């Protein structure tokens, strides 16, 4: 088949590599000037690093260089992905600076028409494809609130931007920086700029739990959360095996384990002393996002270099005789020249026609995708990377194999009614466990391995029992999944 792939992050690149191996023609469209997706130079804020350790955040057959640190920087991840594209000879198939502006599916020809615009040459091109894979990511459009008074604030020299739009320390030097949010990106930015800025103030609508990179400054968090045991501490849709025990008769053991971790985190980060102790139990860390502690953040809060106002939000931006400022819901007025918003993303696919969007999403905007991969009864269309998780890169890679098997005819989907039933059940579970904060049905944190298991089971290629057992005790090794590619290629008698 002739296949169009939109996006050149982990999902787009792994999809291109896998589909090429199965003999398909691929064309990858990337609107930025470099590959990398969320790791592109156009989206990196100061202080950006991975949450996963290097050994767990790689693709199965392409480890990071040994000289990389335990938690690679955003720039290093982008270089890794560029090297991945080069190593697997993908560069010739990637069209950079090329935005997909419109698509159309022709029922008569069963083909997709894809219109693109090149920001360098200004060229508009129309091409036809047999299949379309959407890999534009769930973090495709930054969401910046429209605060009251923002026009006057900006006219007076103030700036409002998303964390992904702040690229340089020089942009904060000598300024009063107000950071909105308490997630990883917000705390990363606050920590990165606090010594350059005149003042650094974090406004947190609510406090969430964060995990130190090393518990008690000794135990790497990967032994806690990047294992099957760590994932099993949180309740999945359907419980099997030992997980039934953990959430049944073994519930006291499970609660005790999480309680001990909560005690360690609270003590290590001095949360009560800093008045930053979340009001909810530690297990709520898996509701919508899992955030690592930013190195130095709590130390700078204690030292007064970073101020955190909790249970608050910006009500209005304004200008007075002293300059620009922000009024908070607490009644405070704080100086602010630069407002940096770690306020999330819009999940949208602007290049799909409305008739397709209506089939892909529900009335609340949730993506209705079977296995987080394909919409029901929409031919020639798949999504990859619409499953935010700890091991998102492995979900993308195994997802690419799943798409290859689907296209090849080896994977038979259930009837439409059964697919819809599964999707509805999954969305209801997501809504309940995240209090509705499931990123339009794309957030499966922390259930990465459960999702991969489902994809492998669909392809009749489950992991060996010994490998699963090892993953219960030790952090997941991406290399465990490298045999899946070889197995599927052999099934189709394709020479790699």
Image: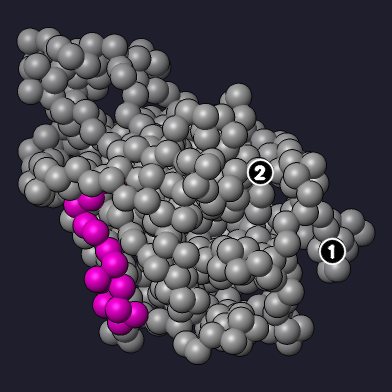
Q: Nearer the viewer, residue 144 or 48?
A: 144
| Dots 2, 1 in contact, CB < 8 A | no
Q: Residue at x 64, y 33 (%)?
A: 435
Q: Residue at x 92, y 59 (%)?
A: 249
Instruction: Report which residue position mark 2 lands on.
Output: 376
Q: Nearer the viewer, residue 270 or 494?
A: 494
Instruction: Report which residue position mark 1 lands on.
Output: 240
User: Which type of secondary structure does the marked residue at label 1 adopt?
Assistant: loop
| Boundaries of the magenta span | 86-100
Which quadrant of the structure image shows residue 101? top left
Mark 1, other Cα within 10 Å: few <14 / some 14–19 / many ≥20:
few
- Residue 56's mark? none
- Quick check: 219 above or below 420? below
Q: Indicate the position of residue 230 as horizontal and vertical percent values.
A: 66, 65
Q: Indicate the position of residue 122 as horizontal and vertical percent values.
A: 11, 43
Q: Residue at x 61, y 81 (%)?
A: 492
- Quick check: 419 above or below 260? above
Q: Indicate the position of residue 456 as horizontal and vertical percent values.
A: 68, 70
Mark nearer the N terminus (2 vs 1):
1
Q: Nearer the viewer, mark 2 or mark 1?
A: 2
Which quadrant of the structure image shows residue 58? bottom left
- Quick check: 24 above or below 317? below
Q: Is residue 88 a member of the stretch shown in magenta?
A: yes
Q: Indicate the position of residue 207 as horizontal and vertical percent values.
A: 50, 37
Q: How is the image coloured?
A: one colour
User: Which type of secondary structure does the marked residue at label 2 adopt?
Assistant: loop
CA gap, disc 2 to disc 1? Answer: 27 Å
Q: Residue at x 23, y 46 (%)?
A: 125
């Amino acid at each position: 088949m002739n296949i169009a792939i939109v996006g050149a992050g982990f999902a787009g690149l792994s999809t291109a590599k896998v589909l090429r191996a199965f003999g398909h023609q691929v064309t990858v469209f990337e609107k930025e000037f470099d590959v990398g997706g969320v790791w592109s130079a156009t989206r990196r804020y100061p202080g950006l690093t991975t949450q996963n350790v290097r050994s767990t955040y790689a693709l199965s057959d392409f480890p990071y260089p040994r000289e990389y640190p335990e938690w690679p920087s955003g720039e290093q991840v982008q270089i890794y992905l560029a090297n991945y594209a080069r190593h697997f000879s993908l560069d010739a198939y990637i069209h950079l600076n090329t935005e997909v502006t419109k698509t159309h599916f022709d029922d008569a020809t069963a083909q997709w028409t894809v219109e693109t615009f090149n920001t360098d040459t200004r060229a508009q091109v129309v091409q036809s494809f047999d299949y379309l894979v959407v890999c534009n990511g769930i973090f495709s459009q930054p969401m910046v609130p429209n605060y009251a008074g923002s026009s006057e604030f900006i006219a007076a020299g103030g700036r409002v931007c998303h964390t992904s739009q702040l690229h340089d320390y020089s942009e904060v030097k000598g300024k009063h920086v107000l950071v909105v949010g308490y997630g990883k990106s917000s705390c990363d930015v606050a920590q990165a700029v606090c010594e350059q800025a005149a003042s650094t103030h974090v406004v947190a609508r609510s406090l969430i739990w964060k995990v130190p990179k090393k518990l008690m400054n000794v135990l790497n968090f990967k032994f806690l959360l990047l294992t099957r045991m760590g994932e099993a501490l949180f309740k999945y849709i359907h419980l099997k095996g030992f997980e039934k025990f953990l959430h049944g008769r073994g519930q006291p053991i499970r609660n005790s384990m999480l309680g001990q971790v909560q005690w360690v985190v609270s003590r290590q980060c001095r949360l009560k002393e800093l008045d930053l102790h979340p009001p909810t139990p530690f297990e709520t860390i898996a509701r919508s996002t899992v955030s690592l502690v930013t190195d130095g953040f709590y130390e700078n809060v204690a030292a007064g270099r970073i101020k955190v106002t909790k249970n608050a939000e910006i009500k209005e931006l304004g200008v007075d005789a002293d300059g620009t400022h922000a009024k908070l819901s607490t009644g405070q007025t704080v100086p602010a020249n630069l407002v940096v918003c770690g306020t999330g993303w819009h999940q949208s696919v602007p290049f799909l026609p409305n008739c397709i969007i209506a089939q892909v999403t529900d009335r609340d905007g949730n993506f209705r995708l079977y296995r987080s991969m394909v919409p029901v009864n929409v031919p020639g269309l798949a999504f990859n990377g619409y499953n935010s998780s700890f091991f998102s890169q492995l979900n993308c890679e195994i997802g690419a194999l799943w798409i290859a098997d689907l296209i090849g005819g080896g994977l038979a989907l259930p009837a439409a009614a059964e697919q819809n039933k599964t999707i509805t059940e999954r969305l209801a579970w997501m809504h309940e466990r995240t209090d509705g904060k499931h990123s339009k049905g794309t957030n499966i944190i922390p259930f990465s391995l459960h999702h991969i298991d489902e994809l492998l089971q669909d392809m009749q290629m489950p992991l060996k029992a010994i490998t699963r057992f090892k993953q219960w005790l030790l952090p997941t090794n991406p290399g465990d999944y490298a045999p899946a590619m070889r197995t599927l290629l052999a099934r189709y008698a394709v020479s790699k």
